[in-house]
Amino acid sequence: MPPIIPDYDDASMDVRKMKSLDEKLALDLAKDLIQWKIGKRNLLNSKTACLLRKLSTQIEQKHEALFKNLCNRLDLNERNVTETCGQIADELIGNDINWGRIVVLYTFGAKVAEHFHENGTDLSDEISKWIGNYMAKKSDWIRKAGGWDAFTEQFKDVKEENEKFWWNSLLCTTLGLGTLAAMLYVKS
């Protein structure tokens, strides 16, 4: 099923400039993961979205200590959230982009949105747009890597593939978490 492309208001001009399906899907995936994370159930019905939710959950469970006080340690607030997240994304992704680091970026963004939601501020749209815009800048890499279909193929369900391949694929994700941990240490 193709992704549902939402209408955007005038305040999201950067998002409106997105042209490729990969860019639109990047935004839709961010919205989906964040909505799922904060408990809303208006979700995309696609293999890619379901897989991203599953990977994100596994990453958080495996690295619970890292994510537990993430936002507090970064001292995020409404005024600095996009700038701080942008700096972390640049460090996390840098020139060594891979699907694992992209999963970590989405997981990080969803965790930030969840933090604000739990503290009474809904920044889910703003953070979704930030991730969408950030990933739009990486659309050439996504296209060259085979698009979001290649992401889904790389991280096939463990029932379809052997566990060794699954966890080797997640190794790329762990490398991204190492960068995130280093950023937390520098910021504290």
Image (cartoon, grey):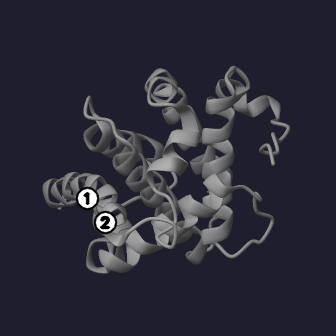
Q: Which mark is residue 171?
A: 1
Classify 158 as above or below 51: below
Q: Which mark is residue 76?
A: none
Mark 1 or 2, which is nearer the eye? 2
Q: Are marks 1 and 2 in contact (CB under 8 Å)?
A: yes
Is 119 in front, or is 38? 38
Q: Residue at x 20, y 60 (%)?
A: 181
Q: Is residue 77 visible?
A: no
Secondary structure beneath dot 2 equals: helix
Q: Which residue is denoted by mark 2 in the rendering? A: 167
Q: Residue at x 15, y 55 (%)?
A: 182
Classify 133 as above or below 111: above
Question: Spatial distance from mark 1 to mark 2, Cα to Cα?
Answer: 6 Å
The kind of residue tagged 2 is Trp
Q: Residue at x 40, y 59 (%)?
A: 76
Q: Position of residue 79 (x, y in %)?
A: 48, 48
Q: Residue at x 66, y 56 (%)?
A: 47
Q: Position of residue 8 (x, y in %)?
A: 81, 36
